[in-house]
Image (cartoon, rainbow, N blue to C red):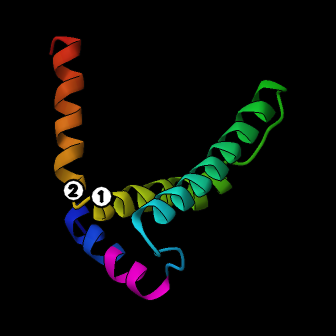
Amino acid sequence: MTLHELQTERRSFDDEFWQHKENIDVWTRHILFHLQKLVGKVSGYVEQREHKVDVSTDQLKSEVIPDLLGYALQLGNLFEADVEELYRQRLDAVRSRAGT
């Protein structure tokens, strides 16, 4: 499945299930809350690793990674942006800065 297809699927999913869509500001703020929760999960993992705890990556794989993609797709839909194209442009910009 391409990012285009995932973005379309996310739009349909949000039409049916997303509860915080009164306006773009409410929607964006709620996404921010969820992103902060995800960062906390990554922080918890990193802290445990720094304390030499053998912590599982299961939560990162089952929640954080897919949710990050989901929120990127949501933001793309909210701002009428093609996430796949934006990501390619971003990679090109990084390559350019790196001189490759």
Quarter location, residue 95: top left
Q: Residues within 10 Å of mark 2 (few under 14, many from 20)?
A: some
The residue at the point 45 percent across, 59 percent down is: 71
Q: Which residue lies at the image location 47% right of the left edge and 75% below the top edge? A: 22
Q: Which quadrant is the N terminus positioned in? A: bottom left
**Could you tell me residue 79's position as x and y percent?**
28, 58
Amino acid marked by disc 2:
Ala
The region drawn magenta spans 11-17
Residue 81 is tagged as 2
> Which of 15/83 is in front?
15
Compared across the picture, whether 32 is left or right of 94 comes to right
The residue tagged with tag 1: helix, strand or loop? helix
Callout 1–callout 2 Cβ contact below 8 Å: yes
Spot occupied by residue 9 in the image (x, y as percentages of width and height): 31, 77
Residue 98 % position (x, y): 23, 13
Q: Vertically, is 89 above or below 16?
A: above
Q: Earlier in the sequence, mark 1 or mark 2?
A: 1
Identify the residue at the far top of this view.
99
